[in-house]
Structure formats: structure tokens, C-alpha cells
Amino acid sequence: MKTVTLTIDGRAVQAREGEKLLRVALENGIYIPNLCAIPGVKHPAAACRLCFVEIEGYPRPVTACTEPVVEGMVVSTRSPRVDRLVSTAFELLLSNHRLDCATCPRNRSCELQRIARERRFPLRVKRLRKLERNLPLDDSSPVLRYDPNRCVLCGRCVWVCREKGTGVLGFAGRGFERKVTTFGDVPLGQSGCNGCGECTRVCPVGALTGKEV
Amino acid sequence: MHLTEEEKKVALEQTGNILESYSRERGNLIPILQQVQEKLGYVPLVAMEEVARHLGMPPVDVYSVATFYNQFRLIPPGKHQIKVCMGTACHMKGGNIILDCWKRRLSIDVNQVTPDREFSLERVACVGCCTMAPVTVIDEEVHGRVTPTRVDGLLFSFGVKIPKGQQKEGEAIGRE
Ligand code: SF4
Ligand code: SF4
Ligand code: FES
Ligand code: FES
């Protein structure tokens, strides 16, 4: 496949033509916030709206996870427009996320914390109203714990559960009610989940976590 | 929600009949679910499993679609179907308070049916009677300007008595 050269934040990088910009940036040590991107997925959902970048000659910011790289592309991962879009998307995510890092199993290894750190966003809801879902914790599996209140609906677990697990996870409901769940909303322990734990390895937050040894 | 063996049998039979006329393409999912709903009045989990098998997709994906659209109900309708309007006008006039009243009196949540199958509760979008907001539709009959007392009155008209001592605002009635 053809190799192309592009510029990201003033740095020249090489990549295979057609690869997604987000991957290229991450592989070159340039961090762009992202939650829903899954390596190797052909048609990304681009649902989290966190990976916006500016590309020279484009009228408005685009999501890096869906943008294929082309020769000579000039990319900037930061700009006032990008920062505004990303901070709003981030705050929207936090507005219905149970933000209680002290009790969270992913405290210090959490992608939301990382985004806040990298972009200097407060880990706090300021402009919006907090809407907690107060869904019950699912503790039924012998190996996993699922706290839907921390889920950011990135879909990574649903994907990996199909690729490597038993395919029991999926989305249900719409809007505020949307959640990751099983067929008929049965607890994980009765869902046919085999406890492989792949979902806990891809979950970027403290929603799906392993039970401690 | 527990279905009787009889209900499951009927659901499976009907779903089987419907599936016979559909090829195994995923694009048929929504028309199939609509047919099931039309035949049974709801789309039970057992039917979803059959549909998933027919179309060769994970059952949770069928569940996903069925829960995404308001048009699908997952439980059998009650003998009386209570639909509380949550359109803009009704919302402004306190539709959510009325919905809460129904929930508490019947001791069920939205999209549930009472254990005796007498009443089921749903929220609907504007039913076109905004001047009468807030509106509750019971079995096609529109009731306007609903108040908590009116909720009790309506229940009374269906033979449900609110026992003394439970008449406090919005308290659950002693249903089995
Ligand atoms: S998921 Fe991350 S941001 Fe959310 S509570 Fe846990 S550690 Fe904190
Ligand atoms: S449980 Fe975790 S991996 Fe699954 S959608 Fe929610 S945040 Fe993403
Ligand atoms: S990673 Fe691009 S929109 Fe989520
Ligand atoms: S909003 Fe309820 S009838 Fe129009």
C-alpha cells in the first residue's frame, strides 16, 4: 500500500494511505481524545464526538477516527473551534456519568481522567445540569462487575464481546434511556456470558470491571 | 413480567407463521416485529429469540431494535390501557405529575402491566388534544385536565376502590 506523508501539529509523519487519522496520530505519540474508536473497525460510529481536529482547507473540524489520511494533509489537533467542541462533548458525557473517582475501580487508569488531564478540562459539570441515571449495579457475574451509571456508551465492549466473547452485550433503549445491556435486560450472570473478561479490558472507564482476584 | 405457558405457545406459533413469509435478510427485522406486534399486541422475548434465529443475528440486536422504537411494546397490554400524554402542552401542564400518580396508584412503572393484567401504563406523544392538557387516554377514550383526584376517580370508575387511609396524595393502592 502507498505511503503518504502528512503533518500533524507541525510534525511530519508517515502513514499508510487511507489509514484513519486518529490511529496515525496515536501511533506517533500525538494524543487526540477518543472513546468510541476501535482499531480495525471499517465504519466507525464516531459517537463520542471527542476526536475533532482541524484540517487545512476543510471548512470545519472533522472527527479524526473517521478521516482517512491523504498525502500532504496538514492537521492541527488543537484550535479554539476544536477545543470548544471537545470540551462541550466532554461535559455532556460527564453530565450523566457517575463521577465518583474515589470509589471507582478505574481511578487513575481512566480515559476520562486522561482526557481531562491532557486537555486541562475540569472533571466536573459546570455549565450543564447533572442527570444521574441511578441504574442498579450488576454484580451477578462471578468475574465481572457492571455499573451502568459509569458507562459512556462507547460501544467497545459490545464489539469485543462479539469478536472474542459470547456476543451477549448490546445496546437497548433510546436517548437518555440508552444503555448497554443483555437480551431482555437479564443480569450478566444469567446472560450466557462466559466470563472471558474481554469487555473489562476495552472499557475506557469504570463501567465494566473485573472482580478482584 | 411472566408469561403463561399458553401465552408463550401462542407467541411461538404466531411468530413461526409470520417468519414463513420472510426471507432471512436482516432488512426484514422491523417489518417482522411489526407483524408480530399486530398479531399478538406485543413483542415478547420468546418471539424475539425466534426472529433472531431466523435472521441469523444475536438476540440482543433484536432486543436493541425493539426497545429503540416506541411503537413496540414488550409486554402484553392490560385489559385497560392507560396512556399518559407527555407532549409539550401536557408536559407544561404537569403531565409528569399525572404519570407519577398513575405509577404510584397502580404500583407499576411505565411499560408495565399490573400483575392481574387489568391495567397497563404507557407514555405517549401528543395525542392532539392540547387544549385539554394534561391528557390521559384510557382505551381510546380521552380524559382531559387530569388531576390526581381525577386519577382516583377514573380508577374508581373501573371498580378500583382506594381504601381509607391510603387516600393521601398519590399513595399506592393495595393491589395484588
Ligand atoms: S470512570 Fe473515570 S471519571 Fe468516572 S468515576 Fe471512574 S475514574 Fe472517575
Ligand atoms: S460498558 Fe464500558 S466499554 Fe461498554 S459501552 Fe460502556 S463505557 Fe464503553
Ligand atoms: S473516537 Fe472519534 S468520535 Fe469517538
Ligand atoms: S401535548 Fe398532550 S395532547 Fe398535545
Image (cartoon, coloured by chain):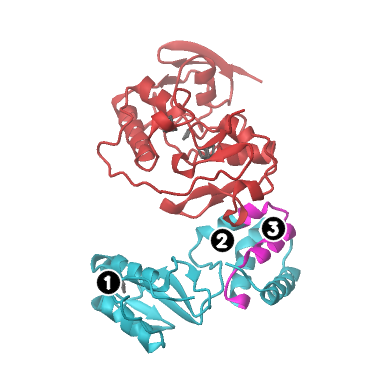
Chain colours: A red, B cyan
Q: Which mark lies nearer to you, 1 or 2?
A: 1
Q: Residue lying furthest front in this view?
A: B165
Q: Hey, which residue is sitting farthest top in the picture? A: A11
The residue located at (57%, 76%) in the rendering is B41
Location of residue A198 in the rendering, given as x and y in whole percent from the top left corner: 64, 33
Would you name the residue on which mark 3 appears?
B52
Which residue is under mark 1? Answer: B169
Region of the chain picked out in magenta, as a range: B39-62
Marks 1/3: CA–CA distance: 45 Å
Residue A2 occupies which quadrant of the picture?
top right
Neighbourhood count class around disc 3 (C-alpha, 10 Å): few under 14, some 14–19, many 20 upward:
many
**Residue indicated by mark 2:** B66
Give yes or no for contact between labels 3 and 2 (Cβ–Cβ under 8 Å): no
Disc 3 and disc 2 on one polypeptide chain: yes
SS assignment at label 1: loop
Type of the residue with mark 2: Ala
